[in-house]
Image (cartoon, coloured by chain):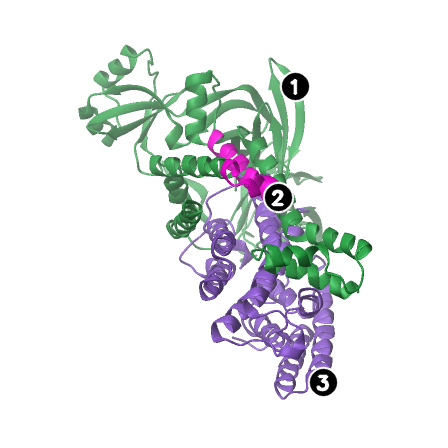
Amino acid sequence: MAIKYTIQGLLIYATMAAYLLAFVVTLLRKPKAGHAIYLLGFAVAVVSYGYRWVHVRHVPLQNLFEVFLCLGMIYPVSVFCRRVLRVGGYAADMFIGAFVLFPAGFKFSAEPQHLPPALQSWLFVPHVAAYTLSYIFMFKATVQAFCQLLGKNPKPGENLLPPEQATYSIVCVGFPLLTLGLILGSYWGQLAWGDYWGWDPKELWSLASWLVFVGYFHFRYMFGKRHPRANSLWVIVGMVTIIITLLWVNLSRLFSGLHSYAT
Amino acid sequence: MWAALALIILLTVFSIYGAFIGAARAEQFFNRAPLAIYWVAFAILLVVAINVFPRLVRVPGLLLMHAACILILAGGMWGSRAGHALQEKFLGIEKIRTGRITIYEGHAENSVILQDEDLKYLFSIEPEFASDLHNRTVSEELRQEFEKHQKPLSQPVKVWVKPEGNGWVIADTSSAYIARKEDGALNIYDPTKELPFALRLKDFRIEYYEPAYLEIEISAGQTQRVSADVGLEHDLGGELGKVKIVGEYRNFKMSLDDGKRVAYDDPSPGFNPALEVEITSPDGNVSTQYIFPHMPEFGHAQGKLKITYKGPIPRMVRDYISKLEVVKDGQVVAEKDIEVNHPLYFGGYHFYQSDYDHVAHQYTDLSVYSDTGLRLVFIGYWALCIGVLWHFWLRHVSVARISSLVTWRGRPGLVSRRHRAGGREQGQDALATSKIRNRK
């Protein structure tokens, strides 16, 4: 845990502050002001990401610091979910934005690194970007799943989907990205390491998380909305496997694997 | 459906278990007989599902996704160890599944070192011979055993324990064998198989992000700067002769071998970088000098060249490059510079750089993979991508667009009608309906 006394660090902290302020203001029933501050926070997050891009001179998706910096630009996902999917949760998104920037701001090293040979591939950006975006959607789906479990329904005038359906809608958007990430990763493995499947712990965790969502779709097809709590639990379990895929395998010294450079 | 759900949950559990035991053991686990039964059952269930559930045929996205899974499973099984063994037995297709090939610069090689599981069984000998191997010797009786099986050993023969510890390597000047104690017998295996073509390594080199130099004092106060890349030779001119960078060490150590000091790279943790240079004086005298970037004064002994390393330590590698030629029947039939992410594909095999000579950059280790089943897997990948994107995204976008073109305000659209009738795809329908609403 260390404070970053750099321009990059300041930009991250400014984004976090804006997100948290937006969160508080929204909770205080001033959604318009909250939205404006959220938008401002997003602008700072974009500047922060752009600054990193210029600084390291490659698409900043190489390590956990950069991936989390990217995850911090969550605003367009909020807008997409609200406008297209009719799923709310702006306040939760503001909090998620601040939450995912926390490790980038205080935990992960921001030391710029050269791209090791294995990462110099056209697949680098689509593979990581697909995963990053899918994780944001799945995170939002999980928030809706928790809303369902806690019985928090949107207010009648808001024109929003009930949480169970909202969860499903978001998973439907995130799942193709999760699939793309997995397949692009497998194809990249074939190009870089010789085998499209190496049974590496990170590969197996990512397969497990994909399978949990496959299981969710089959379960929901079988029972529809008859077991809404079970539906929500599937998504929460999926998110747990995603978090393990993303963090544990990288950070834990329990496993060594082909992805260990991405710490 | 219950069976499908059960198999999906089972595979999730297997994957998590596999993640805990590490890649090597996970690969063994997923290739074992019980798992082979699981894979076959999974594939059969998918085929049955497509036949039993009309919806899986009627909805193109669902059909693509499920057919894709069948293709990926079939490709995976066809290219597995068991798949290769079955093809050899029933179709007579003899192909190396995977292995390693070591090639020195200027040499051609076609002998692939196989993985433990793929070794070719030759014959068995009495288990008592294990004591021979334990003492790292080959007795006359053992030699006769090899002769009896038409595998005579020439002199000298060396015996050592395999690095993995599960057997011995018996090597004479031309061939090597693996001996393993199994079920009370001592089995002899051939650890190599030959490719129908050879690979020649023309050059192996490493490219770095930042250059590194050697500053050589050529006269009092005057220095010459040359590249510090291994393998390069520089002419210093005049009385100094030539300097060649012959090796680099990450963790430099010296050992005494027959009273002679020998430098080696210690693989154990520790960081003592050094460069080895060979200096050829104009009269042909060759001497060796070590340069230590962390201790610049250390190598500046009397009578030696004053050489200082200038550059980052350790150096960040940008790329590893092996210049290769494929040789068949004495003819060069293909050429390729292998880089990371750019393997060589020839004759049904992919070749990747997996390791190299860390000191002198004289050889490269390539891993060899058979392409059996790969096409099926990749067709499956395409089908899965298209199926998923179509089913979850594109059909809704297109349905929404068509609906917005042909529908009209106030009347229920195409999607809304299905919404009321089906009820099972409500989330997706909601996605499409909300899109229509926005368009309005």
Q: Quadrant of residue B429?
A: bottom right
Q: Tell me which chain appears green.
A: B
| Chain A as rendered: colour | purple
Q: Which mark is residue B219?
A: none
Nearest the camera: B430 or B290? B430
Taken as a whole, is the magenta stretch helix, strand or loop?
helix
The residue singled out by tag 2 in the image is B59
Instruction: Please identify, in this view, whether the residue under mark 2 or under mark 1 is nearer the observer.
Output: 2
Left or right: residue B222 versus residue B304 is right
Magenta region: B50-78
The disc, 2 or 1, on the residue closer to the chain's N-terminal end is: 2
The residue singled out by tag 3 in the image is A33
Is B302 located above or below residue B336 in the figure?
below
Q: Secondary structure at mark 3?
A: helix
Residue at the image point whose x is 30% and y is 32% from the top = B167
Instruction: Please identify, in this view, whether the residue under mark 1 or under mark 3 is nearer the observer.
Output: 3
Q: Callout 1: residue from which chain?
A: B
Q: Amino acid at mark 1?
A: Val
- Give me the C-alpha separation between circle 2 and circle 1: 51 Å
Left or right: residue A36 versus residue A230 is right
- Rendered location of residue A171, percent (x, y): 58, 59
